[in-house]
Image (cartoon, grey):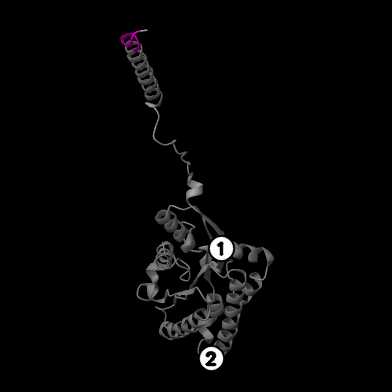
Amino acid sequence: MSKNVIRFITILAVFFCLLWAAGLGWAVKEYYAGKPDQAPQRTKVVTKTENQKGLTIVALGDSLTRGTGDETGKGYVGDLVDEIKQKTKRPVQLTNLGINGQRSDQLKKQVQQMEVQRQLEKADVILLTIGGNDLFRGGQGLIDFQSGDIAAIEKKYLNNLKFIFQQIRKHNDHANVFFIGLYNPFSEMDQGKEMSKVIRHWNYDSAEVSAAFPKIVFVPTFDLFELKVNDYLYSDKFHPNTKGYRLIAERVASLLTW
């Protein structure tokens, strides 16, 4: 076979080899042309419940916790819950354990109940009003506030208050506790100024007791009612009305960390 024929066959073989390689490359390119550089990541759909942890609030105390005198039925507790829902967009679970007419010795017994302790353990926020019935006693406080009896009554009250705080912290060491101070519903009566002195003294001593415990905040309300008390009282001239409870709720809300 001549050299020219061999050269021709070699060139022809190389040509077909290159043609085959080009076809293979084109086929591979077409195969991968529509594929992404990386595999798509699965996106987790987060529901509202998963994204927002609910807030648990437990309210303890007397008729102020129940909202007695509020025409809407909410009281400061209900107003505060509405405020929290609006500002945080979080679901709120409220357990209101307030009892009309409750005194500190009765609350002392209540916080020792197993179901109450179970509720306290779950709480993120604890609200508390107590002391008004110890001091005023249905109006009796207006009669004997200048006697020596008032000092003995306050001493018992402060001891009860200390025990109540101890029980709360025993069963829940993380919740913020907001302890609502007393106002003077009788400031425009004849004994109003003298009664204001007594209430300020009670508030001071109560705040001192609460200050001895971590994350228990005393919330003053005396100043809210002092100048226009009748504008913020219910028809019984003792409990707050809707506007009065709103003032208390706003004061507590101002202390919350949103």
Q: Looking at the rendered structure, which numbered label has been put on residue 15?
A: none
Relative side of 108 to 53, left or right: right
Relative side of 232 to 205, left or right: left
Describe the element under mark 2 as helix, strand or loop.
loop
Q: What residue sits 38% from the left and 21% below the top?
A: 21
Tags 2 and 1 touching, CB below 8 Å: no
Relative side of 216 to 97, left or right: left
Q: Which callout, 2 or 1, points at the residue further toward the start of the chain?
A: 1
**Image location (x, y in percent) of residue 7:** 32, 13
Q: Amino acid at mark 1?
A: Ala
**Image location (x, y in percent) of residue 245:** 44, 65
Describe the element under mark 1 as helix, strand or loop.
loop
**Magenta region, mostly helix, strand or loop?**
helix
Q: How many marks?
A: 2
**Image location (x, y in percent) of residue 230:** 39, 70
**Image location (x, y in percent) of residue 128:** 53, 70
Q: Residue furthest bottom?
A: 148
Q: Residue furthest left?
A: 4
The segment highlighted magenta reads 2-6
Q: Amino acid at mark 2?
A: Ser
Q: Quadrant of the C terminus?
A: bottom left
Position of 37 relative to 56 (above/below): above
Q: Which residue is mark 2?
A: 147
Q: Which residue is mark 1?
A: 123
